[in-house]
Image: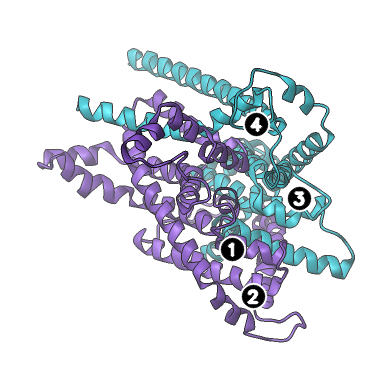
Amino acid sequence: MKKSNFFGRFLVALTLIFLYLPIIVLIVFSFNDSKSRTVWSGFTFDWYIKLFSDRAVLNSLYVTLAVSVLAAVLATIIGTFAAIGFFNMRRKWRAPLLTISNIPVINADIITGVSLSLLFVSAGALFKFDLGFGTLLIAHITFNIPYVILSVMPKLYQLDKNLFEAAQDLGCTWMQAFIKVIIPEIRPGIINGLIIAFTMSVDDFVISYFTAGSKVQTLSMFIYAMTRKRISPEINAISTLLFVIVLVLLIINNIREARQEKALLKKSAVLEGDV
Amino acid sequence: MNGHKTTSNGNGHFLRGIYHRMPAYPYVIWMALFVVIPIILVVVYAFTASDGKFTLNNFAHISDYAIVFGRSLLLALIATIICLILGYPVAYVLSKFGQSTQRIIIMLIMLPMWINFLLRTYSWMSLLENTGLINRFLAAIGLFNLINNIFGTDIRHLQMINTQGAVILGMVYNYLPFMILPIYSVIVKIDKSVIEAAQDLGANSSKVFTKVIFPLSLSGVISGITMVFVPSVSTFIISKLLGGGTQILLGDLIEMQFLGSAYNPHLGAAISLIMMIIVVICMSVMNKFGEGEEQTVIL
């Protein structure tokens, strides 16, 4: 038992080293005093300082954040309502609609991107518009909604159906019952969906690449354009910053959850002691 | 008032009637516009020439690229198998750790996904290059000198970048979490009493694994395989960055037809259609193994 335990720890440690090796390289070279990505020539904060005066980088960061926030919020609204509507449908209708809904999740990103770009280019020729922020946003909302539905749906199934009836018996209108009873009950699913949608949007490159046109550039697209030449360590710097922000948020969240769990354990221990 | 009436059918649904299905209608229209029509357009483009007439020429052209299809499928398959061999034991071992350790490690496995995918892959370039960090390290510990002294060769570096191996490494690196997470989430949900029952009935630990744990974790394995195989077979960045353009894959081929030098969306659509068929075949084969379990999507 001991032996397999050691082997297990070793295996997990090795996997984590594998996953973090390039990330550590990336972070270390964001402090490198030259443009080289393999030779260390001294410590500097220059790339971080340069970053905040580089218009192109900041602009692409702004586009990424704007499209991710907007797409995540809109997808969460549309997706939550869609999940409720699907939930109330007969299986005959729900099953095929959910299958269609999941197409962007299952399909290869490149096909989602290419198919949307075919639509946008043909519609653009017809109605005289160019690919840009609008088409980018539509694409992001489209691939985000299924993730929202997938995280809200299970919460609806857990819902006690009597709750809604009880609220109405106690004098709530449909809308009041919906806002005061249903929404709070499924809130964890909604928030989870929002976070997943935001993550998918920030990380997306392929679909954006095919649907943003030539005038708008997300951070991913900007980085891709750079990989053809040579990536400036500024990009290492901005990724390090984003990584640290996410890390801090996750740690805070983790501590909070652990505390809640501990509090709950204590509470249940006390209650059990009473009985 | 009747609109508020809820029916107490066995499905546990809290609302019935058209009024309550309405929240889904905007999305149904959205799906029609941005999911269904685009796919129909891919099919239309695949079967037409640039003058809009019906043709099968696009598919006839595809045979020129048989080698790319073969390479894509092979590399994606190898990457998927490696991910499974690495990912399953990790997921299994992980499920035996303490609660809080499990949570931290799962967080650590997901965290790299927050670093831009292009940058993670680009970072591998710095590691794998001929003058890259791994080669520098190997030279620094005197490995090349040692080999050269023994065999009288003149090796200066180990060729890693721009090889198929590098492309496979890139796929494994980027998609390994997609294998670990679904398998892990299925294994942790296995009822402990089932395992105890098997032990009580005389199964040793390897029997418990092959007869109980593995079959019960199969649905996770299946979603893991699809979640690794589909992006691997369709990638076009990994091959570009780590294969150095010498290892063109299906994704590169499609990209070239739409945004690259060889602009021909009709051919691109035909290749996309075939890739979609590959994905559908892969999914249905996998679903057969999974006994029609619902797709688990985990992030």
Can you tell which quarter of the image residue B103 is in? Answer: top left
Secondary element under disc 3, as helix, strand or loop, is helix
| Residue A83 left/right relative to A211 | left
The residue that disc 3 covers is: A137
Tag on residue A36? 4
Chain B as rendered: colour: purple
**Same chain? Circles 2 and 3:** no
The residue that disc 2 covers is: B43
Q: Is residue A15 visible?
A: yes
Instruction: Return the disc, 4 or 1, that comes first in the chain's sequence.
Output: 4
Chain at tag 3: A
From the rendered image, report the letter of the chain displayed in cyan. Answer: A
| Amino acid type of the residue that numbered disc 1 sits on in the rendered structure | Ile
Residue placed most toward the observer, B111 or B253: B253
Q: CA distance from mark 1 to mark 3?
A: 20 Å
Q: Do the numbered discs 2 and 3 sit on residues whose CB atoms are within 8 Å?
A: no
Point 56% across, 53% down: residue: B239
Point 44% across, 29% down: residue: B105
Find residue B88 and report its horizontal and vertical position in percent. 34, 43
| Amino acid type of the residue that numbered disc 2 sits on in the rendered structure | Val
The residue that disc 1 covers is: A100
